[in-house]
Image: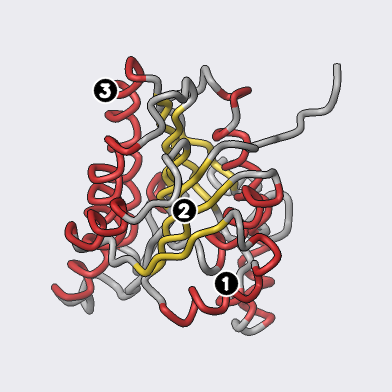
Amino acid sequence: MSNLQFSFKNKSAVVTGGAQGIGFQITLSFLQAGGNVTVWDYSEAALESAKKELASFKDQVQFTQVDVTQKDSCEKAVQALAWPCDVLVNNAGITRDKSFGKMTFEDWNDVINTNLTGLFNVTKTLSEKFNTASAHKRIINISSVVGLYGNFGQTNYAAAKAGVIGMTKTLGKELGRKGFTVNAIAPGFIATAMTQAMPKETLDAMAAKVPVARLGSTSDIANAVMFLASEQASYINGAVLSVDGGLVI
């Protein structure tokens, strides 16, 4: 029995929010495994930065500026796809953290529109553009541990990520007969450029809450995505995989 290795040669993925943070690592992992990737991201600066960092994969990657909150933007991006889609990773998301008492209607709407409605917009517009020849169509939604247990100051974010889980389970039931599997990943505390800017004592306090006593890496999430996108995961459907070092135990 050999070690599990992933190859996505002749397969294509769309990764939303794929130019930065966790999304960038997911993009890189697919490219390193031989796949083609279309990166959808709202940030023009992030897209330009990613384009430079991934220059060695220029024949495998396409970059498109997309506002997932806008159906028309998603539809335009779908029409511009360079390759039929085998794997969709819904990763795009934002935060607008405040306690419920201080949270504005704008804070609520911004997060729900991006993290939940945006996921619907992308999946709806792209679902008919999947590779018809593929027997292993994959939709992988990035949720969060806060969608499982809530979190102070994140009413909007927790609600959106819980909604993502509900969508994942429903789509898993509806699309399974059409050759899809639909799963979610719930990251815990992950070290990104954003978290690295936090004070050390804050990071240490976060790590102390995790049973394995460390923050996760973007590679931890990308590895989980790669597995769920692989043919080896063909009987996993409607699942929520917590990648959190045991935070939800």
Could you tell me if the residues under marks 2 and 3 are in contact, i.e. CB atoms within 8 Å? no
Tell me where residue 172 appears, x and y as whole percent: 35, 26
Tell me where residue 195 appears, x and y as whole percent: 59, 74
Q: Which mark is residue 50?
A: 1
- Helix, strand or loop status at disc 2: strand
The quadrant in which residue 66 appears is bottom left
**Residue at mark 2:** 15
Of tags 1 and 3, the one toward the viewer is: 1
Q: How far apart are marks 1 and 2 (CA)?
A: 13 Å
User: Of label 1 and label 3, which has the lower sequence position?
Assistant: 1
- Helix, strand or loop status at disc 1: helix
Quadrant that contains the C terminus: top right
How are the residues colored?
secondary structure
- Residue at 32% x, 46% y is 162
Instruction: Say what amino acid the circle numbered 3 marks.
Output: Glu
Could you tell me if the residues under marks 1 and 3 are in contact, i.e. CB atoms within 8 Å? no
| Up/down of 99 relative to 159, above or below | below
Quadrant that contains the N terminus: top right
Tell me where residue 218 appears, x and y as whole percent: 63, 58
| Up/down of 64 relative to 48, above or below | above
User: Of label 2 and label 3, which has the lower sequence position?
Assistant: 2
Q: How far apart are marks 1 and 3 (CA)?
A: 35 Å
The quadrant in which residue 194 appears is bottom right
Tell me where residue 160 appears, x and y as whole percent: 29, 54
Instruction: Say what amino acid the circle numbered 2 marks.
Output: Val
Instruction: Say what amino acid the circle numbered 1 marks.
Output: Ala
Q: How crowded is mark 1: few (under 14 residues within 10 Å), some or many (20 or more)?
A: some
| Up/down of 187 relative to 198, above or below | above
| Up/down of 59 relative to 19, above or below | above
**Residue at mark 3:** 174
User: Of label 1 and label 2, which has the lower sequence position?
Assistant: 2
